[in-house]
Structures are given as structure tokens and as C-alpha cells.
Image (spheres, rainbow, N blue to C red):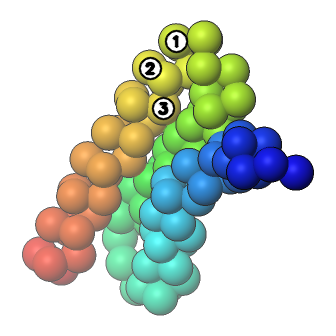
Amino acid sequence: MTDEQVDRLLKPIINASYPGTLSALSLAVLEIVGRDVPTILRIILSMNALLFLFSAFFIFFYSIYSWKRWLWTATAVTFILGLCGSLISVICLVLI
């Protein structure tokens, strides 16, 4: 295989790994805090994990089908919502 083919095959996986890592981080925080935190914080952390997971899927498929602009829009919206949720959950964790 040439370098161009390898880059074309690996690029979607590499791109999807960035929001996927943030999703795993949200789940790790959810596991660490356990049931000692309010329900709303557990819901926010769960939603963050889902938003980052959706973002990973959208960016994976956008890397393959780059002519479908709605995938880029969906990636951006879910990623930004996940970041906002992460900020809210950090503020809630500090205040608790």
C-alpha cells in the first residue's frame, strides 16, 4: 500500500479518536464520583459521554464522505454541546 492509501484509511479513525477520548473521560468521571453526587450531575456527565460519542461517529463518517456537509455541522454542534456540558459539570463538581 502506498502512503496515500494508508493515510486515507487511517485518517477517519484518528479523527474519531479525539472526541472518543473525551467520551471515555466523561464516563471515567462518572464512575469515579459514583452515586454520591446529585442526579442532575450524573445526567450531565452521561449526556456529555453521548454527545462526544455522537461527535466521534459524525467526524468518522465526515472523514469518509467529505461532500456531506451536514455531517460537519452535526460534528460541530455535538462537540460544542459536549464541551459546554463538560464545563457545567466541572463547575458543579467544584461547587459540591
Q: How many marks?
A: 3
Q: Amino acid at mark 2?
A: Thr
Give the crowd class for mark 1: few <14, some 14-19, many >=20 residues within 10 Å.
few
Residue depicted at 15% across the width and 66% down the height: 91
First of labels 3, 1 by sequence position: 1
Residue 69's mark? 1
Do residues under tags 3 and 1 come within 8 Å of each other at their CB atoms? no
Residue at mark 3 to residue at mark 1: CA–CA distance:
10 Å
The residue mark sitting in front, 1 or 2, is 1
Is residue 50 rendered to the left or right of residue 95? right
Q: Amino acid at mark 1?
A: Arg
Residue depicted at 32% across the width and 39% down the height: 80
Position of 67 relative to 7 (above/below): above
User: In the rendering, at what x and y percent does residue 20 appear?
Assistant: 57, 59
**Is label 3 in a helix, a strand or a loop?**
helix
Q: Amino acid at mark 3?
A: Thr
Give the crowd class for mark 2: few <14, some 14-19, many >=20 residues within 10 Å.
some
Pointer 2 residue:
73
Q: Nearer the viewer, residue 94 or 65?
A: 65
Give the position of the C terminus as an image quadrant: bottom left
Residue depicted at 11% across the width and 75% down the height: 95
Q: Nearer the viewer, residue 90 or 14?
A: 14
Q: Nearer the viewer, residue 44 or 14?
A: 14
